[in-house]
Image (spheres, grey):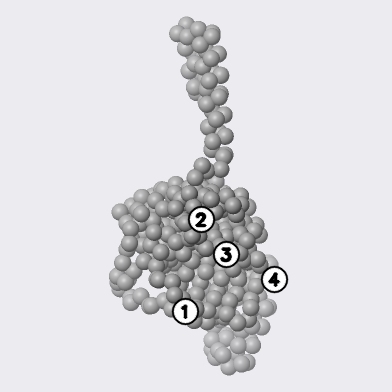
Amino acid sequence: MERFIADLVKRFEDGKITRRQFCETVALAATVYAAGESAANAAPTQGFKMISVNHISYACPDYRKARDFYTSVLGMQNAKDDGKSRANLTFGPKRGGNYFIARNAQPTNTPPAKSVVDHVCYTISNWNDARVNATLKTHGLNPTGRSGSVNVLDPFNYSVQLASSEAENPFI
Amino acid sequence: MQGFVATKLNEFEQGKISRRKLIETLALAATALYSTGAEATPAAEPGLQVALVNHISYTCPNFKQAGDWYSKVFNLDQVGLKDTEVTLPFGKKGEKPYDVTAKDVPLTFIICRTRDLNAAPANGQPRPQSQAVVNHIAYTIADYDRAKVLAELKRMGFDNPREDGEHSFHIADPFGYDVQISGINMTALTGG
């Protein structure tokens, strides 16, 4: 905006536009700018505004093993456990955070999807390669990967990735 | 650290781990902690703490179709288009994840991919078959209002979304994958 106004002033000073044109142009520019801001902040006109992943539903042969793995290795908190077939494990911010449902797989009549979530990656804040690898090895895991990102298998051979913001960032 | 040691000691006493394993585990745990200076926080356990979902890796027959669907339903931009995948961040560049204060936690994103999951990995090691599945993902949307969400779903052609509790509906994406759309009030304590 500043550049636009500066150019406009120069044109006015050079006598290329009148005072009236100058004022009208600035006013119009301000209106367009404000409309753009409003539009940018408004709710989408179609579809939904995504905030975050709410939860991951993970079905396996024994939810207890999954619960124990995801709490002890990844630091998730066991928030709700029915003691029979499922547990809800929380992580992230209190509001808008994520949770992980570890559940025993149940038979279903739903046709299988043609697609799959083949792995989930979790961000670790304050990443330190040595610490992450050593901690995973403490739990008997065999991390593979690169600096800032490792992969391990959970008790049911599901692929779990852990990463830093530098290694896994949609804009880098 | 003390809690971790007690747990491992219990496992040893119950015969779940050998003496050698106990020693190795505790030595490694202590080394890991001391190498990072974590000993200054006595309550710290030698585990990690995940901050947020970084990304969902979604493999399907047509990644472009999937990308377009998720873009349309959740208003997501597409970045990082490659031959076999596209990335959809949950926001614009420079934005922070909802309610996250740490500076090193990026926006969550979905990677829609088309690839052969049965192909031999680059390292030549056989890929073990997973006994678990992520059978659905739920996404939190802003300003959840049941009537408005239902109306918008129907406008987009989802005639029979399955309601799940007070704060969510289930729909299927183009490949039959179960996608749950949730309000922020659906939590680990209230939701399924």
- Rounded to the nearest angstrom, the CA distance separating label 1 from label 4 is 42 Å
Q: Can you tell which of label 4 and label 3 is closer to the viewer?
A: 3
10 Å crowding of disc 3: few (<14), some (14-19), many (20+) = some
Task: Give the vertical position of A29 relative to B127 (above or below).
Answer: above
Q: Are marks 1 and 3 in contact (CB under 8 Å)?
A: no
SS class, disc 2: loop
| Residue toward you, B123 or B25 | B123
The residue beneath circle 3 is B164
- The amino acid marked with disc number 1 is Pro
Q: Chain of mark 4?
A: B
Query: Going from the N terminus, do you reach mark 3 or mark 2 first?
Result: 2
Residue named by callout 4: B43
Q: Are marks 3 and 2 on the same chain?
A: yes
- Helix or strand or loop: what does disc 3 sit on? loop
**Location of residue B135 in the rendering, given as x and y in whole percent from the top left corner:** 47, 69
Pointer 1 residue: A107
Residue placed farthest to the right in the image? B42
Label 2 resides on the chain identified as B
Q: Nearer the viewer, mark 2 or mark 1?
A: 1
Q: Residues within 10 Å of mark 4 (few under 14, many from 20)?
A: few
Task: Return the disc, 4 or 3, that comes first in the chain's sequence.
Answer: 4
Residue A142 sits in quarter: bottom left
Mark 4 or mark 2, earlier in chain: 4
The chain identifier of the residue carrying mark 1 reads A
Residues tagged by mark 2 and mark 1 found on one chain of the structure = no
Where B37 falls versus A33 (above or below)? below
Regarding residue A110, the answer to whether it shows in the image is yes
Residue drawn at x 54%, y 9% is A20
Q: Between residues A108 and A28, which one lies in front from this camera angle?
A: A108
